[in-house]
Amino acid sequence: MTTVIKGGTIVTADLTYKADVKVDGGKIVEIGPNLSGDTVLDATGCYVMPGGIDPHVHLEMPFMGTYSADDFESGTRAGLAGGTTMVVDFCLPAPDQSLLEALTMWDNKTSRATADYSFHMAITGWNERIFDEMKVIVQEKGINTFKHFMAYKGALMVNDDEMFASFQRCAELGALPLVHAENGDVVASMTAKLLAEGNDGPEAHAYSRPPEVEGEATNRAIMLADMAGVPLYVVHTSCEQAHEAIRRARQKGMRVYGEPLIQHLTLDESEYFNKDWDHAARRVMSPPFRNKQHQDSLWAGLQSGSLSVVATDHCAFTTEQKRFGVGNFAKIPNGTGGLEDRLPMLWTYGVMTGRLTMNEFVAVTSTNIAKILNIYPKKGAVLVGADADLVVWDPKRSKTISAETQQSSIDYNVFEGKQVTGLPRFTLTRGYVAIEEDTVKTREGHGQFVKREPFTAVNKALSTWKELVAPRKVERTGIPATGV
Ligand code: URP
Ligand code: ZN
Ligand code: ZN
Ligand code: ZN
């Protein structure tokens, strides 16, 4: 059974051209004019693009005394409804838990996934077993990324010695370290001070983690990665201070990637000063939303290429869960949703405003991350042989974002009331038409795990690198006797 997407304009990260796309057995089998097939999808007036890849989601994740509300079924369904055909979730072992045991637990959550997925493995402690297991994770389990939390002290946070050891291990294994870059010690100290002074509302969350906290940690992680000789991926880059560190590193030739979120690009810190406690608490996430100058910096980074990927960090909690933090902002579960809205929001606020070209849109929502994760061109491409993870994008369809009509299982939407233009006409996951305009036909269990092979890319930019890897020992003629 073949499907032909007919009459559309193909938009990839580097080309825009008119052609039909033929799909068979879940793959793209032909691209060209006047194709025919068993089923025809009318793409007249539409752009045919690689489906979005969201490399940063937390589905059914145990966190801050609860579980994030969207699971692999509702999360991937929300993704498909918004044109996202693959997600990468984070496997979070407890500090003394075996990585492999945690991976089995995470695997068990995915049986109802409606779109393809993969995992990043978090390093939340350090010991010999973790060192050994990292090799199995990379060489046998198809996971080539390790996440490090520099914040959430007393829970997920790792110290510099642990992080540096893990970075060096990543370098040996051909894996890419990821960091949540905020100085967790400073956040803990500022949080305690704010609470002691009676600042317990959601607005204090933003004061507890200013941009400097993120800039410092981003710089530190970059320097550690450089010393370890490994590339680095910085998740949820939200501010100029972090962007500046990434820009500088890249200018020196280092492979450092920054990932702004659609939330940070389009929502600002004024949300925390809303008089309604629920409104503000629903937007509590780390790092927090920033002011307009930081937003401009992130948009500029996407334009110039100093920032590489737009993600969501989809980590949705219900209003009821957010209320765990009434009287103490530090207990509000951190996280916001966005999986369904990332593409329409970025199209509306990025492409339609002229900030991004259509090709840049494809690059930052799909192709760049496929390359970074080493799954290109299986994913992130409109090429013969690639998976038929495709979105037929109708630039004229519009809607007002509302919790009433969303796929996510939470009771609100941080983008509520935003008018977006540019929505999927069809979303295909490995050839299966899961979304046809407002009709959701997702299939539970259709989603498959995507294996990712190790990298050969290293980070050899700075002059210190070689000496650190191969120290030069001085043969001395006279060594003084010890002690007198
Ligand atoms: O506030 C956030 N970002 N919650 C999800 C966990 C994380 O830090 O990415
Ligand atoms: Zn994070
Ligand atoms: Zn409100
Ligand atoms: Zn996250």
Image: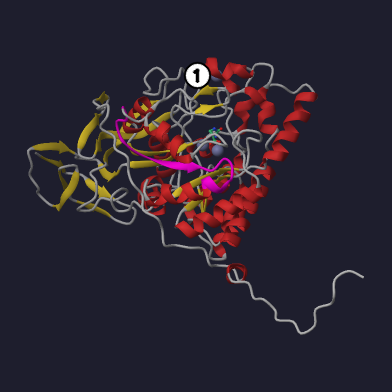
**Residue 121 on the magenta span:** yes
Question: What secondary structure is found at the residue carrying circle 1?
Answer: loop
Q: Residues within 10 Å of mark 1 (few under 14, many from 20)?
A: some
The answer to whether 34 appears left or right of 126 in the picture is left
| Pointer 1 residue | 318
Which segment is the magenta one?
A: 112-130
Tell me: residue 285, above or below residue 120.
above
Ligand 2 quadrant assignment: top right
Nearest the eye: 90 or 376:
90
Q: Where residue 79 sits: x, y (%)?
A: 36, 32
Q: Quadrant of residue 251?
A: bottom right
Tell me if 123 is positioned left or right of 55 in this view: right
Q: Position of residue 132 (x, y in %)?
A: 49, 50
Res 244 quadrant in image: bottom right
Specify the farthest residue to the bottom. 477
Magenta segment includes 120: yes
| 401 on left or right of 23 | right
Residue at the spot x=76%, y=85% of the render?
A: 477
